[in-house]
Image (spheres, rainbow, N blue to C red):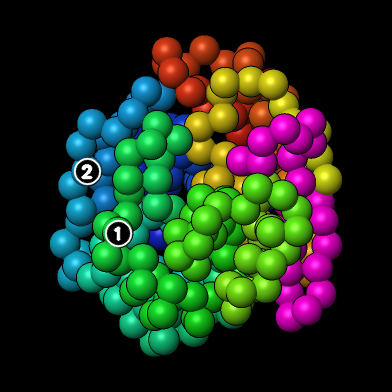
Amino acid sequence: MITNTLTIAGTDCTGGAGIQADIKAISANGSYAMSVITAVVAQNTQGVQRIQMMPIDMIRAQIDSVFCDVEVDAVKIGMLGNAEVIQCVADALKTYKPSKVVLDPVMVAKSGDRLLDSEAVAALRDILLPQVGLITPNLPEAADLLGVTEASNREQMLEQAKRLTVPTFLKGGHLSGEQDSPDLLYVTDNYRWFEGKRIATKNSHGTGCTLSAAIATFWGQGDSLEQACDKAKQYLTSALSKADTLNVGQGHGPVHHFYQYY
């Protein structure tokens, strides 16, 4: 049977990030994609122009609609926007208790536009993190969650992953001076580095959304968390390597989610 993966996130009308990227990544990797929209975001490859948060009762209604009818094998959570939405999603997780939840703590867009209120960071850390099975922060997001300076080397990445208290896939793409793009999976004192060559392309919009959605997909299909992270990184690397075959926008374009079908 084809598994069902739910994404809870904001939109991207140019299709490179957010809900649209999640649906593409889930579908490309063999699961049935469902979505709960937390915010409608007017954005393109050059930046975010406007954000309209969905009413809290509508967000909860969408979640209830899915869980009351469909068996959900995995959940990916992306942009939540503010503390009220974080609390809503946390309450829903307590109600339905999905066993495999991946949280991508979306705080800042590729363009630098902030997508999570600064005062909501504490709510994300204290209310939502204890209920998820994996978080996938990049280096600025991990530093934001911990209230520390961004990691600049592998030793600091490992130290910060230890401090995040939940299973963490810490993305090293922001490391400067690295020819590679190392990611770190840290789970209860065990860790593994996932090595990968840095892909030279400006079309990297939505990489975090795509990776976390792919991890949730593979995890929901029955892979171990380590296997799911490995497969998802391989998928993203391939999607990045084919990104320049797309011609979408004048800024940071998207990765090629369906590269294997073209």
Q: Is residue 123 above or below residue 102?
A: below
Residue 202: x and y in percent read 57, 21
User: Nearest the camera: 51 or 75?
Assistant: 51
Q: Is residue 4 left or right of residue 43?
A: right
Local packing at callout 1 (Cα closer than 10 Å; few below 14, some 14-19, many 20+) is some
Q: Is residue 80 left or right of residue 207?
A: left
Residue 12: x and y in percent read 36, 37
Picture mark count: 2
User: Nearest the camera: 128 or 113?
Assistant: 113
Task: Tell me where the magenta segment starts and ends, as one range.
Answer: 173-194
**Residue pictured at 23% horizontal, 70% vertical:** 84
Residue 246 falls in image quadrant: top right
| Residue 15 lies in the magenta-colored region | no
Q: Is residue 46 left or right of residue 219?
A: left
Q: Nearer the viewer, mark 2 or mark 1?
A: 1
**Residue pictured at 61% horizontal, 69% vertical:** 134
**Residue pictured at 20% horizontal, 37% vertical:** 50
How far is disc 2 from disc 1 in space, using C-alphas?
Answer: 16 Å
Mark carried by residue 118: 1
* Residue beneath disc 2: 51
Residue 129 visible in image: yes
Residue 180: x and y in percent read 79, 36
Residue 78: x and y in percent read 44, 56
**Residue pictured at 73% horizontal, 69% vertical:** 186
Query: Mark 2 or 1 closer to N-term?
Result: 2
Secondary element at tag 2? strand
Amino acid type at mark 1? Ser
Amino acid type at mark 2? Ile
User: Residue placed farthest to the front in the image?
Assistant: 149
